[in-house]
Image (tube, rainbow, N blue to C red):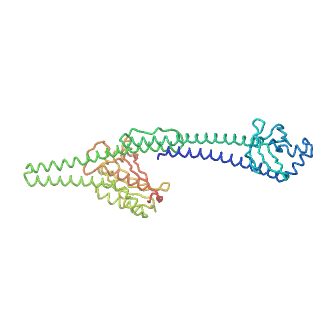
Amino acid sequence: MSLYRRLLIAIVIAIVTVGSCCVAVYRVQEQFLIEQIDNRLLSLDRRLPAVVRKVLASDRRAPVLETALSDIYVGRVGDDGRIETLLALVSRPNSDPQIPAEVENGRPTTVESDDMGAHMRVLTSMTSNNQSVVIGVALDDYLQNLQTLRNLLIALFAVSTAVIVLVFWWVLVLGIRPIRRMVDVARQIADKDRRARMEESKSSSETAELSRALNQMIDSLDASERRMARFVADASHELRTPLSTLTGYSEIYLAGGLRDDEAVCDAMSRIRSTSMRMTGIVEDLLSLLSVDSVKQRQLTMIDVQVMLDQCRQDAAVLDVNRVVTSSCVPNLSLLSNEEVLVRVVMAFVENAITHSRAHGSVAINATSEDGKVKFSVVDEGPGVPPHLVDNIFQPFFKADDSRSSVGTRSGLGLAIAKQLVDTLGGSIGVEATPAGGASFWFALPTRPSLSERE
């Protein structure tokens, strides 16, 4: 059953419940008033002889009698069945009850009177001398009170129904209709129509916030798909060149183009070099997929100076002609994963060696800023143009916007470094140096929060 139908059923149940309560209140009040009148009639019936004697022996218009029995009717039934009025109602002196023949003695009954529209509650009984006497109470005031109560309950029911219907419309407009539109948009997206979007409003309601979140999610999915498509295209392009090389040398060999051992040895050397390059690309791709496992690794307290000395020694092995230096503020440490940090720093170092001028220096630095440790690798290369800064950490991105790789570089080192830093809850970037080089940096909190450790 849909939410709309459930809400509609709830509204109907609420209206019926309010109506039933109003009817119940009216019936209870009516029964209460009738019981009061009947108790009064039965009380007069028990004192009937005294009441009749008092009426017959006194002036029926005496002020005291009018005050005490102003709304009481007393009549005597003659032998011919006619009622002789002994005490008439003060408010309706000509109003005599019309008593049906089937009325039982001793049982209060509501009857009409000779006066148009008037009603009485009467009780007939027999006196000790077998005289039939009728005692009645005018119902005008009681019926007027019941009519007032009925009008109030009708007004209450009408107002309650209007409020319930208004609430239903309000929930329908602000809640159910937007949810239905979301369902339609979700179905369009499932049918590959990514142009579908929710209508956004400036309202602060939950449905408006959900609409904005849904549009943001769709935009994020579109951007993710575009990045994935570009990533696949770039990866395919990176693998196409070495695969073409392997295919070319194998075809030359099969065609008999390699006539001596020296040619075969040269071809095998190139095939090996190309295979190593493909292996590096595949390993970098696998590294991108396994970055999320960093959170599951154990964190330890790291002496930053010792770690930088290790990175400096590893960098010296990569290029013996480079001057690699390291600097760190005294007694600097942080809680993190040392293997990941070394990997990020070395990715910056390899990038600096690849893109800076030959025999240029590379500096590895670490400082403390606002409760964070900032690592930077500074080179003497040509730097990074400002319009390329936003894309420098994208997979397979080349500063010269060329898709061809140089040597065994896959173009994934900086992308892997960025994902590793993001996973550790840090920030990453690149800045130009006063000397014209580039400073690649990343910053990590000294002690990660609990959410970053999980």
Residue 20 screen position, x and y as percent: 62, 46
Q: Is residue 35 visible?
A: yes
Q: Is residue 74 visible?
A: no
- Residue depicted at x 45% and y 59%: 329
Answer with left or right where residue 54 lies relative to residue 368.
Answer: right
Q: Nearer the viewer, residue 67 or 357?
A: 67
- Residue depicted at x 7% and y 53%: 260
Residue 381 screen position, x and y as percent: 33, 47
Residue 283 screen position, x and y as percent: 28, 55
Q: Nearer the viewer, residue 30 or 258?
A: 30
Is 158 rendered above or below residue 312?
A: above
- Residue depicted at x 64% and y 42%: 157
Q: Residue furthest top?
A: 116
Answer with left or right where residue 404 lies relative to residue 45.
Answer: left
Is 418 rendered above or below residue 313?
A: above
- Residue depicted at x 35% and y 48%: 380
Q: Nearer the viewer, residue 313 or 108?
A: 108
Residue 145, image quadrant: top right
Answer with left or right where residue 63 lies relative to residue 318.
Answer: right
Give the tally of numbered discs.
0
Q: Residue furthest front?
A: 80
Q: Nearer the viewer, residue 310 or 362?
A: 310
Residue 274 screen position, x and y as percent: 21, 52
